[in-house]
Every structure is written in C-alpha cells, then in structure tokens.
C-alpha cells in the first residue's frame, strides 16, 4: 500500500495546530468566565488583573499573555455574548416556516433566555455599565445598539406594516422596558414568571400599543427631529456582508437540489456543519475554518458560494 507522506504530514500538522489552539481557547474561556463572575460580584472597577489571575489559578503573566489589559478582557466578554445573541437571532430569522409575528415572539424569548442563562453578564451591564469609560468599548456597544434597533425596527414593520414605521423607535423603547422590568422582578424579587408568560404578555401588550397608535396616529415621541443620528442609522440599509451563518444556511439549502454525487453532498454537508459549529465558538479556530472552506471549495459547483462565504468569514474573523 502506497503511503502519501505529504498528505500524512499535512494532516499531522493540522491536528497539532488544532490541539494547540484548543488549549489556548480553553485558557481564554476560563479567564473570560472568571473575570465575568468577579466583575458581577465585586464590580469592574474594583477587580484587578491580579485577582482574576488568582481566581483562575494562573500567574498574572499568563493572563496578560491572552489579554493585554482589563479593558480588552471586558471588550471580549461583550463581543462573545453579543455574538452568541446574534447567532441565535439569525437562526430565527432564517426559519421561513415562522410568520413575522412568530419570529418576533421567538426573538423576545431569546432575549429573555439570555438573561436567565447568563445573569452575571446582565449584572455587569445593569450594575455599572463599565464599558462607557473606554472609547473602544463605547464604540462597539453603540454599534451593537444600532444593529439591534435596526433588526427590531424591521421586525416591527414586518408584523404591523409600513404605516407603523414612524412609531418603531417608540415601540422599541416600550418593548425593551417591558422585558427588562419583568425579568428584573423575576430574577431580583423572585416573582414566579416563566419565559412563555413574559414573552406572550409583552407581545400582546405590543399588539395593543401598535393598534392604538395606528388608529389614533399621535405624533411619535421619538422621531428624526429629536434623535436624528439614531433615526438615520437604524433606517439606513446595511451595505455590509451577509452573516456567515446565513450564507452557510443558504449553501446547505442549495446542496439539496444540486446535481452532484451523494457522497460529495454528504461530505459538503458535514463540512458545513463543522464550520457552523466553529463559527459559534468564542474564538473560532482558523485552521478549522480554513479546512472546511477548502473542503467546500473542492466542489466546482460550489466555488462562487464558497468564495462569498470565505469573504464574509474573513471580514469577521480575519482568516
């Protein structure tokens, strides 16, 4: 049997790289989780890098190998959780079997579930809003805020029609206030309310608000006149790249109708599955992303879609 030594060396090199990256990612995640807990319990300003290192059972120097400062660490916490939130929203948006109203309801549920799953992260935001003391974090959070309002505006118009557009900012603020208040009394005061109860009640209330505003047509409280920067930002059509997960889902759908061999189809689907799972990690491993993109690109019929997907991933993760 002829052994392809070049292929064997490439595979060995690939596996070693993956193992090494796994160890780095595990350490980074350990630091992130530890820092998040400390920030939530004793405050961001009061927590030192030395305390984070002690909590992780690492040296201070080891922590600085992964994060150059406490501000960088906080920014990575924000990036991780907002990426997790965005990924969940994308899966809902891609579900074509849901009506616009069902999609909005599920998005509200995702928001509420994030509160339950990651109370430390919520505590950091509510307790101190430490990000606003750092220009880079402040810019990141503003971008996230605009993106969230833009997505919510589109959902509201999908549900209530174009005539509701003048009231989308008012409705967004009402929606945010309702969800935050109900989750607050659920978590802090331990009032027994489950996710379905809260999301259903919030959605019903929003229906009443939308119906009343459209019937009475009062002047919106928040408009282009008193908040022009935000109004223009959320109504501006995005010229950026489609999210990688959306492109991967489109490729998965297209694979079912392409004239290719079944073995090739299954290989491509498996590569897509691994790639999608990797994209949802805190720090996607470049070796994995490159490897799966290379697998997909082997199919000539997928070249153009693979190119678009690679471009979108490169835009986000710099591979």
Image (cartoon, helix red, strand yellow):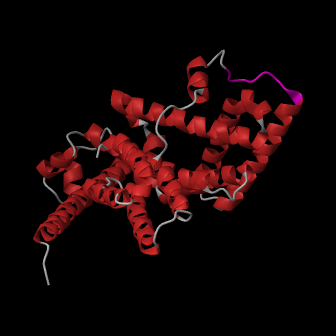
Comparing 189 with 62, the one in front is: 62
In the rendered image, the vertical position of residue 115 relative to residue 169, given as above or below: below
Q: Residue furthest top?
A: 225
Comparing 257 with 32, the one in front is: 257
Q: Residue at x 80, y 38 (%)?
A: 210
Find residue 238 and report its horizontal and vertical position in percent: 53, 32
Q: Which residue is drawn at 14% across and 52% down?
A: 62
Find residue 15 and report its horizontal and vertical position in percent: 19, 67
**The magenta segment:** 216-223
Q: Residue at x 36, y 40 (%)?
A: 315
Left or right, 38 with respect to 257, comes to left
Occupied quadrant, residue 215: top right
For the N terminus, give its image quadrant.
bottom left
Find residue 135 and report its horizontal and vertical position in percent: 35, 27
Left or right, 19 with respect to 299, comes to left
Left or right, 171 with respect to 39, comes to right
Q: Which residue lies furthest to the bottom in this view?
A: 1
Query: Is residue 218 a member of the stretch shown in magenta?
Result: yes
Query: Is residue 73 a member of the stretch shown in magenta?
Result: no
Q: Is residue 49 visible to us here? A: yes
Q: Is residue 188 visible to us here? A: no
Comparing 206 with 239, the one in front is: 239
The kind of secondary structure the magenta stretch mainly shows is: loop
Q: Residue at x 41, y 65 (%)?
A: 268
């Amino acid at each position: 049997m002829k052994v392809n030594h070049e292929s064997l060396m490439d595979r060995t090199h690939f596996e070693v790289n993956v193992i090494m990256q796994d160890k780095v990612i595990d350490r980074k995640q350990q630091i992130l989780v530890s820092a998040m807990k400390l920030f939530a319990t004793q405050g961001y300003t009061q927590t030192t890098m030395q305390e984070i290192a002690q909590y992780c059972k690492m040296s201070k120097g080891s922590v600085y190998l992964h994060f150059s400062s406490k501000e960088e660490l906080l920014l990575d916490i924000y990036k991780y959780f907002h990426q997790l939130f965005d990924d969940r929203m994308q899966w809902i948006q891609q579900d074509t079997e849901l009506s616009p109203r069902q999609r909005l309801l599920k998005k509200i549920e995702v928001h509420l579930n994030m509160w339950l799953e990651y109370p430390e992260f919520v505590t950091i935001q509510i307790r101190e809003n430490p990000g606003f003391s750092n220009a880079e974090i402040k810019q990141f959070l503003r971008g996230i805020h605009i993106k969230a309002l833009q997505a919510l505006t589109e959902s509201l118009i999908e549900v209530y029609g174009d005539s509701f557009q003048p009231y989308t900012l008012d409705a967004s603020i009402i929606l945010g206030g309702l969800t935050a208040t109900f989750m607050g009394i659920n978590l802090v005061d331990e009032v027994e309310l489950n996710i379905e109860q809260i999301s259903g009640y919030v959605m019903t209330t929003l229906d009443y608000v939308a119906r009343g505003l459209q019937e009475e047509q009062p002047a919106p409280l928040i408009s282009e006149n008193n908040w022009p920067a935000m109004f223009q930002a959320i109504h501006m059509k995005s010229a950026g790249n489609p999210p990688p997960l959306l492109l991967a889902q489109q490729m998965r759908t297209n694979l079912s109708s392409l004239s290719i061999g079944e073995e090739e189809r299954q290989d491509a689907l498996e590569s897509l599955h691994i790639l999608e799972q990797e994209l949802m990690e805190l720090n996607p491993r470049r070796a994995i992303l490159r490897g799966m993109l290379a697998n997909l690109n082997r199919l000539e019929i997928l070249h153009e879609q693979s190119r678009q997907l690679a471009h979108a991933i490169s835009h986000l993760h710099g591979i």
